[in-house]
Image (spheres, rainbow, N blue to C red):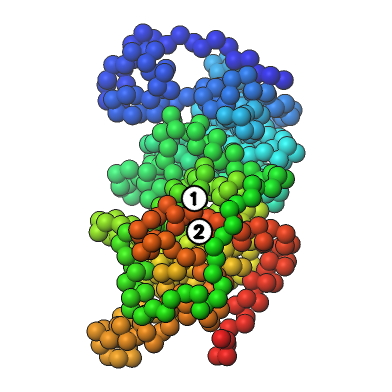
Amino acid sequence: MTITFPPTVEVAEWIRCTRCGEIVYGKRFTRDLGVCPGCALHTRLTARQRIEQLFDDGSVRAIDAPPTPEDPLGFVDSRPYPDRLREARAKTGMDEAVLCVRGTIEGHAAVAAAMDFRFMGGSLGVGVGARIVAAAEVALVEQVPFLLVTASGGARMQEGALSLMQMAKTSQALAELDEAGILTIAVITDPTYGGVAASFATLPDVILSEPGAHIGFAGPRVIEQTIGQELPDGFQTAEFLRAKGLIDDVRPRAALRFTLARLCSLRRTAERPPTAEPSQLLFQPERLPVRDGWTAVQLARHADRPTTLDYAGYMLEEFVELHGDRLSGDCPAIVGGLGRLGGRPIVFIGHQKGHTTRERVERNFGMPTPAGYRKAARLMRLAAKLGYPILTLVDTPGAYPGIEAEEDGQAWAIAENLRLMSTLPVPVVTVVTGEGGSGGALALGVANRVLALSNAVYSVISPEGCASILWKSPTAAPLAAEALRLDARELLRHRIVDGVIPEPGEGAHSDPATTARLLAAAVSEAFEDLAIHEPRKLIAERRQRFRQFDAGSR
C-alpha cells in the first residue's frame, strides 16, 4: 500500500540548539533538515522524516509487516513489557522501531528500512528483525538496492535471547543479498550501538554516516564502568571511525539523498553501453620511439602527470569514492570507488600521488600501506559481488617500506591481492599510467589486459634502488634505468603489457583531458572484448597470461 504521511507537525517558532545554544527560526530549522546552522549538530529524526527526506514524493509504499509475538517472555521490570509497547506506539505512531518501505530516490528504485530511536531506543527485537528480513526479501525479489538507516541502543532486553537471535537472522538476510549480487547501503545515524551495530548496520557494501554520529558495540558508559578506561576525544564518532577505515564516508544530511541516488543508479542493465570511439592502442614495439631509460623515468615521474582522481574526474560519470579497509585504516595512497565508464558501471581503483609537495606528502608519495591494499581488495570483492568490471591504474614507486607497514603485514597484504586478483570472476583491466614500481604496483596489476601509457615505466625495483644494490651507488641510477629495460617500448616487446596508449604532445602532463579520452577509449574497448567471456574463461585466461613469463619470453 502507498504510505500517506500525516501533515508535518508544526515546529516551534524558535528553537534553541542543545549543543551550541544558538536560537534558530523554526521554519529555517525545518528547511535545513534538522541541522543547526551554527554548529552543524544533526538532530535526531523520526523514521518517517528519514523516508520523506530521502525518497521521491508519492513513490513510497509500505512493506507488509509479518506477524510477531508481542510479549514472548511475559517480561516485567518496573512495568510490564506490553505497557511499554503501548506507550511507544502511542508516542511514535509506529507499530515497531523500524519502518520498511519501497520507493524511488531521484527515480532509482530502492527498498529501505529506517529505524526510529523514539521507539524503545530503536531496540532490536523479534518484530524489528522480522521486518528487516521481510524488506530484504523484497529487495531480493525486485533486484534493487537495499538501504538501512540505523538508530539504536542495541538489542531489546525485554525479549531476552530471542532478541539476540535477531542479530544472526538479519545478518543472514544481508548474506542472501550478497549471494544475489544486490547492492546494500547503510546510513548510520546517532546513536547506533550494540546488537544493531554488530549485525546489519555494519555489513553493507557501502557504509555512510551523518556527522557526529556515535557508533560502536559497547557504549562509553559500559566501557568506562566495566574496565575503567578513559576514552579519547571523539571516540566512536563517525569521524573517528572513518579515520580507522571502518566506514566509507561521513556525509552531511543535505548530501545524503544525492549520494544515495548515485549509488542506486549504478545498477547493471541488459542494455549494451554505447559504442566508444576506436582506441589508438599500439601493439608493435617498433612503432614506439627508442627512448633512454632515465628519460622515460623522469617523464613517468613528472609532477603534473594526471593522477588517478584526475582520471576519475575526466572519465567517470556518477563516481562515488569509497574509503577504508573495514579493519584498521584508510590509506590515502590508494583510492577507489564506483562509477560509470561510457555507461558501464565499474569499480575503479588506483594509486594516488597528488601534484603539490603537500599533496604528495599527504598521499605518502603514492606508496601504499597494507591498509591500502586491503581497501583495494575489499573493492575488488565488491566488484565480484556486483558483477562489475574492474579498472586499476598503477602509479607508484612501490609499497611503503616503513616499520608500521611491516608490523601491519605488508608482504601478506600484497600476496593476498595477487591471489585474489587471480580468482576474480569479472573482467580486470590495468593501465600503468606513471611509475610501476615492484610488488607495490603488481598488487593492482594482475589483470586480463595490462596496458601502459607511452611514457610509463614498469620495473622490479626503482633505478635508484637497483643502483644502490648492484652499482653500490645511487648516482648510477641512469645506468640502472637503461639496464632494467623499463620503458613502454621494452615492456611491449617483452609482453609485460598488451598494448600502449600514445600520449599527446609532450606527454600526459601537457594535455590531461586528451590523455584521459585516449585511456577511456582503450579501456572501454578492452571491457567490450572481455564482456563476452564467462567467469571461468576470464580467470583461466588471466592465469595463463601470467604463467607465460619465463626467461625465454620475448
State how far apart marks 1 and 2 are (Cα): 9 Å
Read off the residue under disc 1: 315
Quarter of the image with the C terminus in it: bottom right
Q: Name the residue under label 2.
A: 519
Residues packed near mark 2 inside 10 Å, few (<14), some (14 to 19) or many (20 plus)? many
Q: Is residue 479 above or below residue 336?
A: below
User: Measured along the vertical axis of the image, is residue 32 above or below residue 12?
Assistant: below
Residue 31 horizontal/vertical position (percent): 41, 18
Tell me the quarter of the image containing the N terminus. top right
Q: Please, what is the three-letter code of the amino acid marked with disc 1?
A: Met
Q: Which residue is drawn at 51% across and 61% down?
A: 392
- Vertical placement of 237 versus 506: above or below? above
Q: Is residue 175 visible?
A: no
Q: Quadrant of residue 269?
A: top right
**Residue 480 x %, y %:** 34, 85
Q: Identify which residue is drawn at 64% across, 47% down.
A: 274
In this rendering, position of residue 144 left or right of residue 153: right
The one of 176 and 291 positioned closer to us in this rendering:
291
Give the percent coordinates (x, y) of residue 74: 66, 28
Q: Which amino acid does label 2 sit on?
A: Leu
**Which is nearer the N-term, disc 1 or disc 2?**
1
Question: Which is more toward the observer, 400 or 202?
Answer: 400
Residue 451 drawn at (x, y percent):
53, 68
Q: Which residue is drawn at 32% across and 21% down?
A: 17
